Image (cartoon, helix red, strand yellow):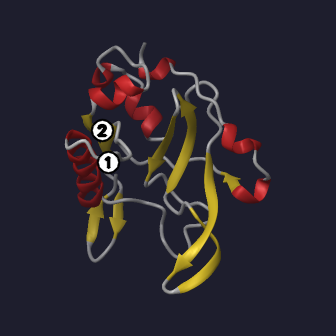
């Protein structure tokens, strides 16, 4: 099966509406594939070379949706900076849905209600670090989230300096 043929479900949206906000990803300019993990793809039931799927970048970039996908950002509570914060949430991650017990989300996908003063984006240097660490931890037998694909783009993102967005 190809990645672009996956059918997702969104059981999280069966919760009451205070637990999420429906939001669409904001696509990056001129996205391109940097890397794809075939091992992670196999967890989803993908048995073809994921890097050859012509729709992979468009889906990860938020330009196209997988069947059954309803995109949303999760809302949650927790402690932040030593104080209880009653309404936190995904400030740069947008959930696509669920397949084979795995939740799919895109990070750096743009603004959500929970982005606060951020821009909802991710920069390439930190995304590469996350991607490599998730694969390394998995290789060491440590349970972790997995990264399916890493894309780059021509979108500039302001941090300490201007950097390429992912």
Residue 74's disc is: none
Establish if 76 lies above or below 138. below
Establish if 67 lies above or below 13. above
Dot 2 corresponds to which residue? 32
- Residue 19 visible within the image: yes
Q: Position of residue 148 (x, y in %)?
A: 35, 36
Asked if residue 8 lies left or right of residue 46, the reply is right
Q: Position of residue 164 (x, y in %)?
A: 28, 58
Asked if residue 75 lies left or right of residue 31, the reply is right
Please name the residue shown 56% across and 34% down the image: 98
Establish if 102 lies above or below 116. above
Bin the neighbour count of mark 2 within 10 Å (Cα to Cα): few under 14, some 14-19, many 20 and up: some
Establish if 59 lies above or below 145. above
Q: How many marks?
A: 2
Quadrant for residue 126, please give it.
Answer: bottom left
Disc 1 secondary structure class? loop
Bin the neighbour count of mark 1 within 10 Å (Cα to Cα): few under 14, some 14-19, many 20 and up: some
Quick one: which residue is furthest to the right in this view? Answer: 16
- Are the residues flagged by discs 2 and 1 in contact, CB closer than 8 Å? yes
Residue 153's disc is: 1
Asked if residue 19 lies left or right of residue 39, the reply is right
- Residue 113 visible within the image: no
Please name the residue shown 76% across and 60% down the image: 18
Q: Position of residue 96 (x, y in %)?
A: 56, 39
Please name the residue shown 59% across and 60% down the image: 112
Q: Nearer the viewer, residue 137 or 71?
A: 137
Between the C-alphas of marks 2 and 1, the distance is 6 Å
């Amino acid at each position: 099966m190809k990645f672009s043929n996956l059918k997702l479900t969104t059981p999280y949206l069966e919760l009451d509406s205070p637990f999420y906000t429906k939001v669409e990803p904001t696509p990056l300019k001129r996205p391109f594939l940097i890397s794809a993990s075939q091992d992670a793809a196999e967890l989803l039931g993908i048995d073809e070379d994921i890097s050859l799927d012509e729709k992979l970048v468009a889906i990860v970039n938020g330009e196209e949706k997988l069947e059954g996908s309803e995109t949303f950002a999760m809302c949650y509570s927790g402690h932040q900076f030593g104080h209880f914060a009653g309404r936190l949430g995904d400030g740069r991650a947008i959930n696509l849905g669920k397949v084979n017990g795995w939740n799919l989300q895109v990070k750096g996908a743009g603004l959500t209600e929970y982005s606060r003063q951020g821009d909802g984006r991710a920069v390439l240097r930190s995304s590469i670090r996350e991607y490599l660490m998730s694969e390394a931890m998995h290789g060491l037998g440590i349970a972790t989230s997995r990264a399916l694909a890493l894309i780059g783009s021509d979108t500039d993102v302001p941090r300490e300096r201007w950097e390429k967005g992912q």
